[in-house]
Image (tube, helix red, strand yellow):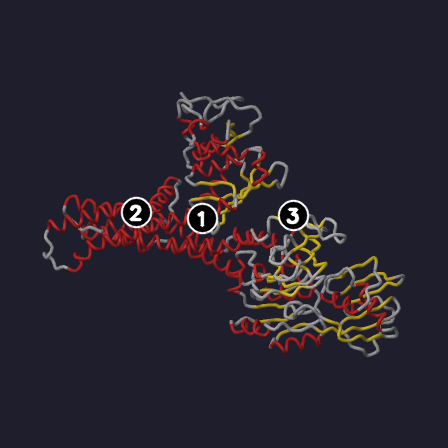
Amino acid sequence: MTPSPSGAGECYHCGLPLPAGTDYAIIIAGMSRQMCCPGCVAVASAIVSSGLDSYYTRRDSYPASSPREVLPAAVRDLQVFDRAEIETRFVDEPSEHEREATLIVEGISCPACVWLNETHLLRTPGVVAASINYTTNRAKVRWDTRHTSLSGILAAISAIGYQAYPYDARSLEAARKREARGLLARLAIAGLGVMQVMMYALPRYIAQQGDIEQSLDALMNWAALILTVPVVLYSAQPFVSGAWRDIRNRRLGMDVPVAAAIAIAFSASVLATLTGQGEVYFDSVAMFVFFLLIARYVELRARQKAASYLESLSHAVPATGNRLSDYPASLQAELVPVAALLAGEHVLVRPGETFPADGTIVRGDSEVDEALLTGESTPVKKLEGHPVTGGSINRGNPLVVRLERVGNETILSAIVRLMERASLSRPRVQQITDRVAARFVAVVLLLAGGTAAWWMTHDAAQALPIVVSVLIVTCPCALALATPMAMAVATSSAARRGLLVTRAHALEGLAQATHFVVDKTGTLTVGQPSVSAVHPLGIARAEALTLAAALEQGSEHPVALAMREAADASLSARQVRNVPGCGIEGVVGTRMLRIGNQRFVAELARDGDTHGVEAQIWLADEDRMLAGFDLQDRVRPDAKGFIAALQAQGAQVILLSGDRESVVHETAKALGVATWRAEMSPQGKLDYVKALQLQGAVVAMVGDGVNDAPVLAQAQIAVALMSGAALAQG
């Protein structure tokens, strides 16, 4: 008799009373069914997702034991991760009822494994989001605590044959070493097997028919069989278990045709050895497994190497820092955990030590190694007032640093987040190959079946080797693995050279880009202009510079830095308003002033006459134009080579700038850029890019600064310099 649906106090799966305060549920046959524990949720989810939910209508009794009793001890022990003191180490709390954790999933060997785990997790009640990085085997999972728990998620993954646990750097490194050692051991056994089996196969290839006695031939077959057994049972185990897992979860992965080829060839060879009739293929089986393991080991090493850069970034910040509690009164340092450091505090960084967070040097000068962040191996000279980045290394003298950004607010943390986001996203080409690979396996199996049927009716003796050949030759491993591996290795290699890929589609888009739109200031130039000339109109040169510096006091724009360096910043402005692409307006003393391009500044002055003076930057009050300023910025040493390389690839390079025409023309001429536009506002740049896109262009925008943020967002590919504003880089 079928048990009645669970009442208010019974678990729908096992029939045990529901513990007080629990709220585990799963949708079965369109209705919400209450469960007593994450174990029941995991088992029921596996039953439903496998299409076996009719079990609940066909059963005539509850299970003899509950999942809490029959689940493996490893799964029961997962409930330890629900303890509050342990959750705090691994789990984030993005909202009141949602939790998020990063997990390590062992057993992932191909993109199909990623798809299976993601699909299974998203079908698990309470899971809000799940994404897995194939390169690092990291899964980021978000769930609703009212419906599931961390242990329930770990159990759900375990239910489909994978092992998961919360991410921990040491555990990850141990898992990687364990995986590499295990694969290397299987490879060694397969290699030894190939060498020994070939010793018995080679005489058969060389000898003429009848040269080898039947008894000796049988002896060599038995020897080859014995030597091939460890290769099949041990070395080929990842392919067989992967195929079984795929079949059990009703998915045709790339391991299915591989395992089928191994099983068919080995079984036929065993049968031929036992009966003394037919061909044996022990050497082919051993060689096939050996070469597949070589490919898998190379792929594993490449994947781990690609993930190592992200790991090195994650561990670049030291565990402790030297806090100066009484600075500047005392240089007595106190060793404290980095997590205890706060913005505004001072730290002492000795030679050879790593900066614990982002800050500004307030005492000393030194050389700083920023290779991990920029890819530049040469240490950078740092003076008092210069910024330093957490994770870089002090190579010279002791420095006192005032911390400005700590913890998750540092540049290093932002880079890690962006790289993780890129690694979790999939470009369009990878999505296509993932779909094609899954269907390709089904086509391969149908093709092998059709081949077997045809040859069995025409020449049965040739059916086996030809069917096995079809399964081997059409193995979709390269199709499924090539794209994610290429993306992972390219992203990691680019990061080591200072190019941070934050979205996976960017590399694919760069290859298709037809137009590169490039900003000038801070992109093609070094971004550190200096005031080369001052044109005062009725006021003193020093006064003009002082007023300009006062307006620019709160800005980090390169022009603002140049003004402050050239003047006495003794005055300050209030009611400051920054107008992107135009300039700055504010009150200094009792005077309303503007500094910026001529059009913007002239709107304030009743008398906009410049008396024939040409300048890049203008200063005015409400009465008249007060002064003009010329700035000079050096072109980057590698800018010309950059432009030439793009043009050599057939891309059209366009220079867009807000600077005046003469300066932009001079820069474009020096770099060999034929198409350029000057005095363009952010909206003008945006409209220009939109017009290109309407003509079918694939636009890559290279810019720096807040002004470039709108056009960077509009372009299909956005490239922002690391020194640019955070908004542009996002």
Disc 3 from disc 1: Cα separation: 33 Å
Q: Are marks 3 and 2 in contact (CB under 8 Å)?
A: no
Name which quarter of the figure residue 629 lies in. bottom right
Per the image, the residue denoted by label 1 is 176
Q: In which quarter of the image is the C terminus?
A: bottom right
Q: Nearer the viewer, residue 566 or 557?
A: 566
Residue 686 visible in the picture: no
Disc 2 designates what residue?
Answer: 260
Residue 570 percent location from the top left of the image: 84, 63
Q: Is residue 234 left or right of residue 667?
A: left
Query: Which residue is depicted at the point 44% across and 50% down?
Result: 111
Relative side of 264 to 316, left or right: left
The 10 Å Cα crowd at callout 1, few under 14, some 14 to 19, many 20 or more, is some
| Of marks 3 and 2, the one in the foreground | 3
> Where residue 399 sits in the image (x, y, percent)?
68, 58
* Mark 2, secondary structure of its residue: helix
Q: Label 3, secondary structure: give it.
A: strand
Position above or below: 680 against 403: below
| Helix, strand or loop status at disc 1 | helix
- Give the mark toward the camera: 1 or 2: 1
Which quadrant of the structure image shows residue 687? bottom right
Q: Can residue 111 be seen in this view?
A: yes
